[in-house]
Image (cartoon, rainbow, N blue to C red):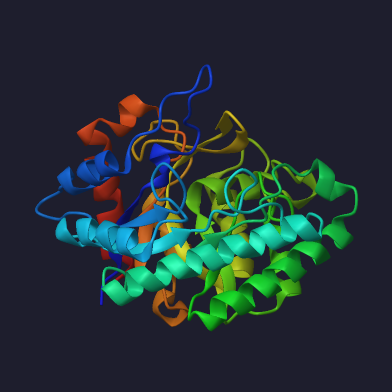
Amino acid sequence: MSLKLHNAMWPGLVGKGDEEGLEPAISFDRMLELTTTAEVNGQKFDGIDCFLFKPHTDPNASDEELRAIADKIAGMGLNIGSLVAPVWPGTVGDSAMGNEASRAKFLEAIRVACRIAKVFNEHGARKYGVIRIDSAEFGVAHWRQDPAGNTKVIAKTFQEAARIAADHGERLAVEGEICWAGMHSWRDVLDLLEAVGMPETVGFQADLAHTYLYLMGYNAPEHALLKPGYSEQEFYAAYEVMVGKLRPWLIDFHVAQNDGQVHGAGSHDKTGKHCLADDPNGKLYITRCAQYWLKDYRERGIQHICWDGCMFPNAALENATTWNTILSAMIDVRDTVG
C-alpha cells in the first residue's frame, strides 16, 4: 500500500494569536477547505493530522462532539492520522521535566489524547497514525543546568506516558525539534529515546526542516555534523550519519523545507523555519532527503506522511498555489519511496 498524503492542521494555529504582532488563527473548517481544494493531476490529500487544542479541537469535547468532528472530516473524503497531544503549559499539560504537579499535567494530556484517539478510531475516520509529543520544556537553558538529571526526568515521564498510550493501543512519537529541551539535538534526542527504552511504544518523529538544524548544531554546537559552506558531498555524508542513528526509531514523518534559519512568533520562538516547498533559499532536496528517512518505512508501521508548514504567513496559507506545490512535492516523495 502506498503512503497516504496528509496535511497538518496546526499551521493554522502555531505562532498565531490575539497578541500584538501576531496574525489570527485560521479556523479548523478553513484549513479543511484549503486541504480539500488542493489537487495535482487528479491527486488530492488523503487526510489530515490534528492538533488537539482550542480553537481547533476542545480537549474536553464530549464523545458526541468528537464524533461530529470525525463525521465532518470523513464526509470531506479525508482520513484522520496522527494527533498532537496538548502537552504544553497553558493547554492541558505542562513540562515533562518539571515537578510532580507539572508531570501529572503532562500525563493527563496523554490520557486526553488517547481518549480522543479512541473515539476517532471507533468512528472509523482514523485507521493509522501516532500521537505526537515533546518535552513541553521550551528552550534548553534550564535543561543545561543538569543535562543528565533532566534527561532522566523526561525519560521517566515518557515511560509513564508510554504505559498510558500502550493501554490504548497507541504509539507516541517524540518530535525532533531544536526548541524542546532534551530533544534539541540529534545526539540528545537519541540519548532520550535510549533512556526511555520502549521502542515498541515511543519512537521518533522526523521533520525535514527541524532535523536540518540538527545537522548544523544550532542549539548544540558540540553535536554539529556540518559547518556553513559545506559541499553537497559533505551534506549527504553528514545526513547519512544523522539519519542512520535516528531512523531505527522513526515512526512518524513530516515533509518540509528549511532555509537554514530559525523563526518564531509569540511564545513559540527560535524553532526551525518552515519554508514553501519551492522556496529558492531552501536547503533541502526534499525527495532525496525523504528517501533517507523513509527507507523500510513499512517495517516501522508508517502508513502516511504529513506536510508541516508552521509559521507560514496567513497569506501563504490562504494561497491555493501553496498547497498545490506542497502536494506535488509529497506526491514525488511517495512515488519515489514506493
Left or right of 147 in this view: 78: left
In this view, the residue farthest toward the left is 42
Where does residue 32 sit, x and y in percent of width and height?
25, 46
Left or right of 3 in this view: 310: right
Q: How many marks?
A: 0
| Residue visible at 70% across and 78% down in the picture | 197
Left or right of 13 in this view: 164: right
Where does residue 112 sit, x and y in percent of width and height?
52, 63
Report whether residue 243 is seen: no
Where does residue 288 sit, x and y in percent of width and height?
41, 56
Choose top left, top right, bottom left or bottom right for residue 87: bottom right
Is the residue 330 above or below the residue 155 in the image? above
Report whether residue 319 is seen: yes
Q: Quadrant of the N terminus?
A: bottom left
Choose top left, top right, bottom left or bottom right for residue 141: top right
Q: Nearer the viewer, residue 79 or 90?
A: 90
Is the residue 107 above or below the residue 14 in the image? below
Where does residue 228 sit, x and y in percent of width and height?
65, 36
Choose top left, top right, bottom left or bottom right for residue 150: bottom right
Q: Quadrant of the C terminus?
A: bottom left
| Residue visible at 46% across and 56% down in the picture | 60
| Residue visible at 43% across and 77% down in the picture | 296
In this view, the residue farthest toward the top is 20
Is the residue 22 above or below the residue 155 in the image? above
Left or right of 324 in this view: 202: right
